[in-house]
C-alpha cells in the first residue's frame, strides 16, 4: 500500500512538473502577434477585461494563462492604464512586464514657432489621446517646442507646461539683457520677438531684423511691419491668405504699426527662444529698413535712399516673375533721414 501511494505521489509530481513546464513554456514563448499593434487600456479596466482584450487583439493566445500568471505573480492590482505598443511575437511574460512597468506609447505634439495661440489651441484640440478642454493662454505665452505626452493626459496640463516653459525661458533671457537695453519689460521683449518671428524665416536674420525694429523705436519711427496689420485683421484666429491692400494698412487698430508708433499692445504670435534671444542680443547695426530680396531673405539698409534702391530691385524681380506687388511696397515711409 505504501509503495502504491509513493508511486502515485511520484506520478502526480511528474505530472505537476510537466504541467508547470508546459505553463512556463506557454508563458515565455513567443506570442501569436504577427505585426506591431497598439492597444489602449482605459483607467478602471478589470484584469479579466484586459486579458480578453489582449486575446481579441491577437497579442496573446489564451486570456486564462494571462490571468493565472498575474495571480501567481500577485500582480493583478498593479497593471497600469494607458496606450501600449506590442511588438510582433511578444510573450505573455513580456506583455505583463510592459503593463507593470507602465511602458506606454510616448506621443509628440509640435507647436511650431510663430503660431498664434488660437492656432496652437487647434493643434491641441486635434491631438489624438489628449482629454478634456483647456482655457487658451494669452497670446505669446506658449513656448514653441515638441512636447511629449501619453494617452489620457489632459489638454489643460499640457497648456500649463507650455506656459511655464515660456515663463522660465523669458525670465532667464531677460536676466541676460545688457545694462542699457532699451525695452522696459519682459512683456515688451515678447511682443517684439513675436514680430521678429513672423517677419523672417531665416534664422541668421533674426538678430538683424530685431536690430532694425529697436533702431526705429529709438528714433521714434513707426515699425511699419505687415504681420501686425495681419494680426489686426484676423486677431490671430484665422489665416490671411491674400496680399495686404492699401486699405488694410489704414485699419484703425492699435496693432496697426503703420498708423501707430511704438510696439503694439501685445504679442502677435508665440515666438521661439531664438527670436527672444535676437531681441535681447540684436545685431550691432545701424540698419533702419529691410525688404524682401526674392530668395526668402531680406535686403537691409541704413538710409532711405539705399532702401528705395532695394525696393526697386525687388519690384523688378516681382515683375519678372509675374507676381503682384504687396501694398507695403506702395506705402510711403514716414521717416525722415
Image (spheres, rainbow, N blue to C red):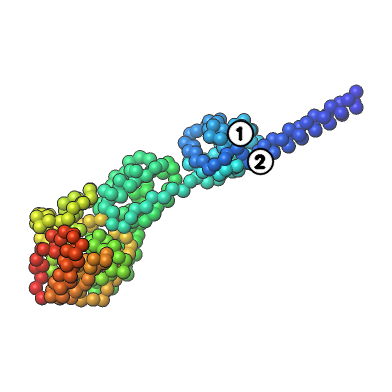
Could you tell me how many numbered marks the image carries?
2
Say which of 17 and 327 sits in front.
327
> In percent of the image, x 21 and y 72: which residue is there?
300
| Residue 34 visible somewhere in the drawing | yes
Dot 1 alpha-carbon crowd within 10 angstroms: few under 14, some 14 to 19, many 20 or more: many
Residue 218, given in percent of the width and then of the height, sits at: 16, 71
Residue 299 vs 45, above or below: the answer is below
Residue with the mark numbered 2: 29
> In percent of the image, x 76 and y 34: which residue is there?
18
Residue 161, given in percent of the width and then of the height, sits at: 37, 52
Q: Earlier in the sequence, mark 2 or mark 1?
A: 2
Q: Give left or right: position of 269 versus 316.
A: right
Q: Quadrant of the N terminus?
A: top right
Residue 40, given in percent of the width and then of the height, sits at: 48, 38
| Residue 74 visible somewhere in the drawing | no
Calculate the distance from the C-alpha at mark 2 to the C-alpha at mark 1.
11 Å
Residue 183: quarter of image: bottom left
Q: Quadrant of the C terminus?
A: bottom left
> In percent of the image, x 87 and y 29: which residue is there?
6
Picture disc at residue 61: 1
Q: Give left or right: position of 252 versus 59.
A: left
**SS category of the residue bearing label 1:** loop
Amino acid at each position: 500500500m505504501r509503495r502504491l501511494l509513493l508511486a502515485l505521489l511520484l506520478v502526480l509530481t511528474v505530472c505537476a512538473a510537466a504541467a508547470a513546464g508546459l505553463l512556463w513554456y506557454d508563458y515565455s514563448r513567443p506570442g501569436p502577434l504577427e505585426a506591431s499593434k497598439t492597444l489602449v487600456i482605459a483607467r478602471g479596466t478589470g484584469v479579466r477585461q484586459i486579458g480578453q482584450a489582449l486575446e481579441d487583439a491577437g497579442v496573446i493566445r489564451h486570456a486564462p494563462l494571462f490571468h493565472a500568471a498575474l495571480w501567481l505573480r500577485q500582480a493583478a492590482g498593479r497593471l497600469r492604464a494607458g496606450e501600449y505598443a506590442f511588438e510582433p511575437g511578444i510573450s505573455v511574460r513580456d506583455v505583463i512586464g510592459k503593463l507593470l512597468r507602465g511602458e506606454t506609447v510616448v506621443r509628440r505634439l509640435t507647436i511650431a514657432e510663430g503660431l498664434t495661440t488660437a492656432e496652437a489651441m487647434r493643434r491641441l484640440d486635434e491631438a489624438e489621446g489628449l482629454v478634456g478642454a483647456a482655457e487658451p493662454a494669452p497670446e505669446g505665452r506658449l513656448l514653441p517646442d515638441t512636447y511629449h505626452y501619453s494617452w489620457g493626459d489632459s489638454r489643460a496640463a499640457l497648456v500649463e507646461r507650455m506656459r511655464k516653459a515660456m515663463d522660465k525661458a523669458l525670465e532667464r533671457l531677460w536676466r541676460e539683457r545688457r545694462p542699457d537695453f532699451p525695452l522696459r519689460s519682459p512683456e515688451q521683449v515678447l511682443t517684439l520677438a513675436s514680430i521678429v518671428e513672423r517677419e523672417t524665416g531665416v534664422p541668421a536674420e533674426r538678430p538683424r531684423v530685431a536690430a532694425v525694429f529697436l533702431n526705429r523705436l529709438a528714433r521714434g519711427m513707426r515699425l511699419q511691419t505687415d504681420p501686425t496689420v495681419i494680426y489686426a485683421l484676423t486677431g490671430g484666429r484665422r489665416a490671411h491668405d491674400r496680399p495686404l491692400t492699401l486699405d488694410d494698412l489704414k485699419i484703425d487698430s492699435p496693432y496697426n504699426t503703420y498708423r501707430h508708433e511704438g510696439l503694439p499692445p501685445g504679442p502677435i504670435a508665440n515666438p521661439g527662444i531664438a527670436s527672444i534671444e535676437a531681441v535681447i542680443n540684436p545685431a550691432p547695426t545701424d540698419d533702419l529698413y529691410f525688404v524682401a530680396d526674392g530668395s526668402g531673405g531680406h535686403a537691409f539698409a541704413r538710409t532711405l535712399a539705399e532702401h528705395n534702391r532695394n525696393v526697386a530691385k525687388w519690384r523688378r524681380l516681382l515683375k519678372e516673375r509675374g507676381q503682384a506687388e504687396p501694398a507695403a511696397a506702395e506705402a510711403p515711409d514716414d521717416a525722415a533721414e
